[in-house]
Amino acid sequence: MAMSFKDALSRLENSRVKSTRPLIPPQILQEDLPLTLLAAQTVLEGRLATEKILRGDDDRLMVVVGYVQNVLARDFSCLPPFRPCSVHNVPAALDYAKLLKAYAVGAQEDLHIVMRVYFEKPRTTVGWKGLINDPDMNNSFRINHGLRLARTLLLDVAKMGLPAGCEFLDTITPQYTADLVSWGAIGARTTESQVHRELTSALSMPTGFKNSTDGSVGIAIDACRAARSGHVFLSVGKEGLSSIVETEVRWCSSTIRMNLIVFR
């Protein structure tokens, strides 16, 4: 039996796509949850302090601190030496941010503290991909809700006067949250990706590339060299429309796993 033109087209495109849903445009979410003056000051001051430290103009130590799962200690000395990879409990993250802010004020002469607020998880195989992708942790994948939760949390943290650091996994989500981020990270699994190097060339905050999962530092250095150059690439604009982005020359750093930072 001859195949119809419609049947032929259905086999050529989206043959493995189960469904598609509209994604809220970044500009709409930013209008719903606008940046406040206090939050903007926090983000900008956090970026400037980070840049000074990375350039060697500030002798303080920059520390990116993540909240500890199920622990809300009043004394930071009793926090165990581990933390989850990403935020999964927004109220707990806010409680931790309050504690961390109080600690940061007391340590500000020696430390520039940035709260680790990761919303996305690059997986080696499969698993939960983070608060933005699946905020309810039940495979409902309410991504629009996840984006709203992420922006709300970053706003609340910034209003406390605490700068935040995020890992970026694609060229779309930064349009929703990057104006609230003081330090960016590209993870070990994505450092070699050309897309992420292009993305980093466009990010407005200081950004670090992790060395690879096998420990290679050279890959992170190559990523810095690539990202510091101008690029032209495909992305999405604030209106949610596909866009061609052109970037200028910038600088970035390498972030070595085990928390040793190498400046480049």
Image: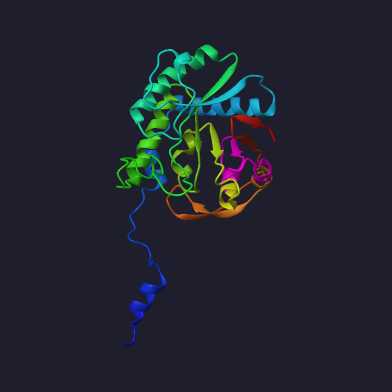
Up/down of 248 relative to 35, above or below: below
Quadrant in which the C terminus appears = top right
Labels in figure, total: 0
Q: Tell me: 213 left or right of 88.
A: right
Front in this rendered view, residue 216 or 72 = 216
Front in this rendered view, residue 86 or 46 = 86
Q: Tell me: 124 left or right of 207.
A: left
Quadrant in which the N terminus appears = bottom left
Residue at image point 60% right, 54% down? 232
Q: Quadrant of residue 263?
A: top right
> What is the x, y in percent for residue 114?
52, 26
Q: Residue furthest bottom?
A: 1
Residue at image point 59% right, 39% down? 210
Q: Which residues are magenta?
A: 199-223
Front in this rendered view, residue 245 or 54 = 54
In magenta segment, residue 162: no
> What is the x, y in percent for residue 83?
46, 28
